[in-house]
Image (spheres, rainbow, N blue to C red):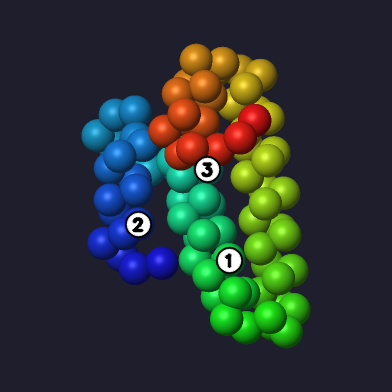
Amino acid sequence: MEKEKKGAIIGDHRSHPQDTGSTAVQVALLTGRMSELAQHLGKNRKDFASQRGLLKLIGQRRRLLTYLAKHERRRYLALIEKLGLKK
C-alpha cells in the first residue's frame, strides 16, 4: 500500500489527531490491503502464498471487528457503514 493511501485511510478513520493504531484504523487498513490482494489474485490465480495471506488478513479483520462490536457498539456500526462491510 502506498504511503499516501495509507495516510489518507488513517486520516479518515482516526478518532483524534494522534490516533494511528486504534481498532477502527486497523480495520480500515486491513480492508485496503485486502482489496489490493483481491485484485492481485484476480490476475494471478495460482499465487497461493498471496491467497494464504489474504485469508490471514480476513481472520485478523474479523477478530478486530468482533472486539469492536463487543466493546464499542456505536463505533462498530459506524465503521461497518463507512467501509461498506456486511455484518
Residue 82 falls left or right of residue 18 = right
Name the quadrant of the N terminus. bottom left
Name the quadrant of the C terminus. top right
Among the two numbered marks 1 and 3 on one chain, the one whose residue lies closer to the N terminus: 3
Return the residue at label 2: 6
Mark 3–mark 2 distance (CA, rounded to whole Å): 12 Å
Return the residue at label 1: 38
Q: Is residue 65 above or below residue 72?
A: below
Residue 33 makes an appearance in the image: yes
Residue density around tag 1, few if under 14, some if 14–19, many if 20 or more, within 10 Å: some
Q: Is residue 7 above or below residue 82?
A: below
Type of amino acid at the residue the image marks with label 2: Lys
- Determine the residue positioned at 69% across, 39% down: 63
Among the two numbered marks 2 and 1 on one chain, the one whose residue lies closer to the N terminus: 2
Among the two numbered marks 3 and 2 on one chain, the one whose residue lies closer to the N terminus: 2
- Determine the residue positioned at 49% across, 37% down: 84
Say which of marks 1 and 3 sits in front. Answer: 1
Q: x, y percentage for residue 4?
A: 26, 62
Return the residue at label 3: 27
Mark 1–mark 3 distance (CA, rounded to whole Å): 16 Å
Judging from the image, what secondary structure is the residue with disc 1 in? helix
- Determine the residue positioned at 34% across, 68% down: 2
